[in-house]
């Protein structure tokens, strides 16, 4: 192993050695604790320390690093006290996630580290969003994100690299190629000769280096950083290394040939760097025991401090409260009563424009939304007013765009992501339900992202452009879900969603875009998320609904004025207005829940269950649901009409009123 010190002085080299040795000694201690049964699990990075330490030393302290679970050296090199890390590993109150997540699955703005989630690939797109925020802010910064050779097979890898290349983002995508994804060797993971060959397809530079050579890692990333800070562009960096322990300790290493261990043992990053410093006269032999003794004492003290710390006392109120970032809905200000009659689609467009003017850090991203104006022309003309930096056409890569939105939020921006159709969110589902939704609960980071979801049937668009998929998200804690039925609500709820620092899924019904119009306030009037609207008073029965169902209910009530139907438009589905629903049901004694989604497991089931549990003694009839057929949505109009809940509304109401 050849080391090139370049212009590094002796003191710096000695400091580097200490940075490299410390995580190795922590790891060795963890293995002892594991054998003693004092910790339950450990993902060892022994043999890979040079990558974590060298890369962290090459980054500026205010630049983000997104590591994985074998990168202890990133955390220690950034100066995180071992006691805090140990508290995180042990699920203690002083850990970064308050016992809510394990090992390195956390982030910290204090140290500019954003940890992984278990799905491996999603953090790559977060790096894109973080870097995009820096570019938009005019900051000359680099972002470093880690992945393993196994995760390069994931779609998230492709999407993130493609976005970074197309948008010329200053991101270093660092692959730790340690030979095995758990037990699967590289020859069963990919068929290219080297992983940096993939860089060619993305139009980016690829570099391959010895990941066990601390100075090669440090010098390479230092050089790359200088270049991409001035001339933003992504780099794919493959660091060759080896995992000297199992994927995690329980996995063992029986699947690895012994000759590989022998060969890579000769390339141990700590031993080789130590030997180099001894030959250079930077390190003296009698210094090594002293350094090790000092570190051992620190490690022992820091670890025992955490074991002495009190355990977490579970508290339901705290757990529920921490799912969302605290947000106080602004008090309504006296506003002029100026209104303009607008279509539903124009109210959405108007809300987006006002939000863009109010929030200079707001970015809208989606397919064809710039010059073309979006599939439904909602953002037509936006580029001329706000520019392409903030109105961003995206490649077809829903996962990466949702992830980039989260990265923007982490780095001080707001993001609105347009799904061309709500159905296409499946391609970004993991980012939504596992990353956006859980981040604040896990480590207290607000995720200021709104996902616009053109939804619903009625336009003959068939099974892949017509689904009402709100129930996929209403059962996911951490997300807020809104579904406006009127132009005024469409604008007011959109403004509120963008103002809210939590992730919001904003459903907008395609059928309503150009089919309805009403007066909409000209100025910024937000509608509080979680508040229903009683749009028609009645005495005999309550219809509880949202979205297109509101218009079905109004049409039914107009046809049957003698039935005195009360109509509740929920407007928000997560949270939903339980108080308003209970008040209406207690008043009328009968409840019909109407929604466009399939009957089975539609959101109406949750409302029906709540009413049965909390309003039973006020009911004069069973709670009845009216939903669409439990089939996919057909394209043919006659079949689509038959599918929709509206086709059964009359007979369902008759059954309710006749009970």
Image: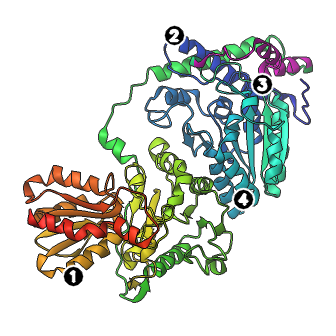
Mark 2 closeness class: few <14, some 14–19, many ≥20 residues within 10 Å: few
Between disc 1 and disc 3, the foreground one is: 1
Are dots 3 and 2 in contact, CB under 8 Å?
no
Magenta-span inclusion, residue 283: no
Q: How many marks?
A: 4
- Residue underneath mark 4: 139
- Residue underneath mark 1: 558
Between disc 1 and disc 2, the foreground one is: 1
N-terminal label among 1 and 2: 2
Magenta segment's dominant SS is helix
- Residue underneath mark 2: 36
In front of the other: 461 or 296: 461
- Residue underneath mark 3: 17
Are dots 1 and 2 in contact, CB under 8 Å?
no
Q: Is residue 540 visible?
A: yes
Between disc 2 and disc 4, the foreground one is: 2
Measured Cα–Cα span from mark 4 to mark 1 = 59 Å
Element type at marker 3? helix
According to the image, what is the colour scheme of the structure?
A: rainbow
Mark 4 closeness class: few <14, some 14–19, many ≥20 residues within 10 Å: few
Measured Cα–Cα span from mark 3 to mark 2 = 29 Å
What span is colored magenta in the figure? Answer: 251-279
- Seen at 91% across and 21% down, the residue is 280
Answer with the quarter of the image where residue 220 lies. Answer: top right
Element type at marker 1? helix
Measured Cα–Cα span from mark 2 to mark 4 = 48 Å
N-terminal label among 4 and 1: 4
- Seen at 66% across and 36% down, the residue is 78
């Amino acid at each position: 192993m050849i080391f090139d010190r370049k212009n590094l002085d002796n003191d710096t080299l000695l400091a580097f050695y200490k940075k490299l040795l410390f995580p190795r000694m922590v790891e060795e201690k963890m293995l002892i604790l594991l054998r003693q049964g004092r910790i339950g699990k450990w993902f060892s990075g022994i043999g890979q320390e040079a990558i974590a330490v060298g890369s962290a030393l090459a980054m500026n302290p205010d630049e983000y690093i997104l590591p994985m679970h074998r990168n202890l050296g990133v955390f220690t090199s950034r100066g995180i006290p071992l006691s805090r890390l140990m508290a995180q590993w042990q699920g203690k109150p002083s850990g970064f996630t308050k016992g809510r997540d394990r090992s390195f699955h956390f982030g910290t703005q204090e140290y500019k580290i954003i940890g992984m989630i278990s799905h491996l690939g999603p953090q790559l797109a977060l790096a894109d969003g973080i870097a995009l925020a820096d570019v938009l802010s005019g900051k000359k910064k680099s972002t470093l994100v880690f992945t393993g050779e196994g995760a390069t097979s994931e779609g998230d890898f492709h999407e993130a690299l493609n976005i970074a290349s197309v948008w010329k983002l200053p991101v270093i995508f660092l692959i730790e190629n340690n030979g095995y994804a758990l037990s699967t060797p590289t020859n069963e993971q990919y068929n290219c000769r080297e992983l940096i060959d993939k860089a060619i397809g993305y139009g980016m530079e690829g570099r391959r280096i010895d990941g066990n050579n601390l100075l090669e890692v440090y010098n390479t990333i230092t050089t790359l950083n200088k270049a991409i800070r001035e001339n933003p562009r992504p780099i794919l960096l493959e660091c060759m290394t080896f995992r000297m322990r199992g994927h995690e300790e329980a996995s063992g290493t029986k699947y690895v040939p012994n000759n590989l261990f022998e060969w890579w043992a000769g390339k141990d990053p700590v031993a080789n760097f130590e030997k180099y410093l001894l030959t250079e006269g930077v390190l003296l032999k009698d210094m090594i025991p002293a350094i090790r003794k000092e570190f051992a004492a620190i490690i022992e003290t820091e670890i025992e401090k955490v074991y002495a710390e009190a355990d977490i006392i579970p508290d339901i109120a705290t757990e529920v409260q921490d799912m969302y970032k605290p947000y106080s809905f602004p008090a309504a200000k006296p506003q002029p009563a100026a209104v303009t009659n607008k279509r539903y689609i124009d109210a959405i467009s108007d809300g987006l424009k006002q939000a863009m003017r109010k929030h200079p850090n707001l970015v809208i991203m989606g397919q064809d939304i710039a010059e073309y104006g979006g599939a439904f022309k909602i953002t037509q003309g936006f580029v001329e007013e706000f520019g392409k930096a903030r109105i961003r056409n995206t490649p077809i890569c829903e996962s990466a765009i949702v992830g980039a939105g989260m990265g923007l939020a982490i780095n001080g921006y707001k993001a609105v992501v347009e799904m061309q159709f709500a159905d296409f969110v499946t391609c970004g589902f993991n980012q939504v339900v596992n990353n956006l939704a859980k981040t604040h609960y896990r480590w207290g980071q607000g995720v200021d992202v709104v996902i616009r979801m053109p939804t619903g049937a009625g336009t003959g668009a068939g099974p892949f452009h017509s689904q009402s998929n709100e129930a996929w998200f209403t059962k996911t804690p951490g997300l807020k879900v809104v579904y406006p039925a009127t132009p005024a609500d469409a604008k007011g709820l959109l403004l509120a969603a963008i103002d809210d620092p939590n992730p919001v899924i904003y459903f907008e019904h395609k059928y309503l875009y150009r089919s309805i119009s009403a007066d909409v306030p000209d100025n910024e009037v937000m509608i509080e998320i979680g508040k229903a609207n009683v749009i028609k008073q009645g005495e005999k029965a309550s219809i509880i609904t949202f979205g297109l169902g509101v218009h079905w209910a109004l049409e039914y009530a107009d046809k049957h004025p003698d039935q005195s139907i009360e109509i509740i438009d929920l407007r928000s589905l997560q949270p939903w207005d339980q108080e308003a629903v209970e008040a209406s049901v207690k008043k009328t004694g009968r409840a019909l829940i109407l929604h466009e989604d399939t009957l089975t497991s539609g959101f109406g089931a949750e409302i029906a269950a709540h009413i049965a549990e909390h309003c039973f003694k006020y009911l004069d009839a069973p709670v009845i649901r009216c939903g669409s057929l439990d089939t996919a949505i057909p394209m043919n109009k006659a079949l689509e009409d038959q599918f929709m809940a509206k086709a059964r509304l009359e007979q369902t109401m008759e059954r309710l009123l006749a009970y």
